[in-house]
Image (cartoon, rainbow, N blue to C red):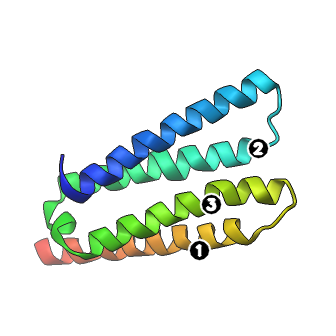
């Protein structure tokens, strides 16, 4: 695995490690109020980023397109904004980062949808 596929997958492993540590901290403290942030980090950071990495590994034509790097930046921004944003929203400080992260995640998924459809059309 190399290139953008590697970066997606390596990032996913970092995010799940942070998610696991966060989950252990919640369990040890008996405070699960931030469980939604933990869940989003694991689903958006680990599962989604990992699946993106697998797709780009299996479909080298998609990974070779410069749009794949834009996709990686959008997906990364989504995780970096959403995880602390949900924490801040739960703590009733601000919802802005959660909202921005959600839109970054949506743009990331739309970019991926475009990539999948375009790559399929090019190989059909």
Residue 93 % position (x, y): 85, 62
Front residue of 94 and 62: 94
Q: Residue at x 80, y 26 (%)?
A: 29
Disc 1 versus disc 2: distance between alpha carbons? Answer: 21 Å
Is label 2 in a helix, a strand or a loop? Answer: loop
Label 2, residues with CA under 10 Å away: few <14, some 14-19, many ≥20? some
Locate residue 44 relative to residue 98 in the image: left or right.
left
Residue at 65% x, 32% y is: 23
Tell me if label 1 and label 2 are in contact, CB under 8 Å: no
Q: Find residue 43 and report its horizontal and vertical position in percent.
A: 54, 48
Between discs 1 and 3, the one toward the N terminus: 3
- Indicate which disc residue 82 carries: 3
Q: Locate residue 17, reporting x and y percent.
A: 50, 35
User: Quick one: label 1 or label 2, which is nearer the N terminus?
Assistant: 2
Above or below: residue 21 compared with residue 43? above
In primary-sequence order, the first of circles 2 and 3 is 2
In the rendered structure, the answer to whether residue 112 lies left or right of residue 108 reads: left
Q: Which quadrant holds residue 24?
A: top right
Residue at the disc numbered 1: 103
Instruction: Tell me the element at label 1.
Output: helix
Sort mark 1 into few (<14), some (14-19) or many (20+) by Cα contacts within 10 Å.
some
Q: Which residue corresponds to mark 2?
A: 34
What is the distance, in whole Å, between disc 1 and disc 3 at their CAs?
Answer: 9 Å
């Amino acid at each position: 695995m190399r290139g953008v596929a590697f970066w997606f997958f390596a990032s996913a492993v970092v995010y799940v490690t942070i998610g696991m540590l966060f989950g252990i901290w919640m369990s040890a403290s008996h405070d699960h109020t931030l469980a939604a942030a933990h869940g989003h980090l694991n689903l958006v950071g680990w599962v989604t980023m990992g699946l993106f990495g697998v797709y780009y590994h299996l479909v080298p034509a998609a990974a070779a397109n410069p749009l794949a790097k834009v996709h990686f930046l959008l997906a990364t921004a989504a995780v970096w904004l959403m995880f602390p944003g949900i924490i801040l929203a739960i703590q009733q400080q601000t919802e802005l980062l959660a909202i921005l992260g959600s839109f970054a995640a949506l743009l990331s998924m739309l970019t991926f949808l475009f990539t999948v459809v375009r790559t399929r059309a090019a190989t059909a």
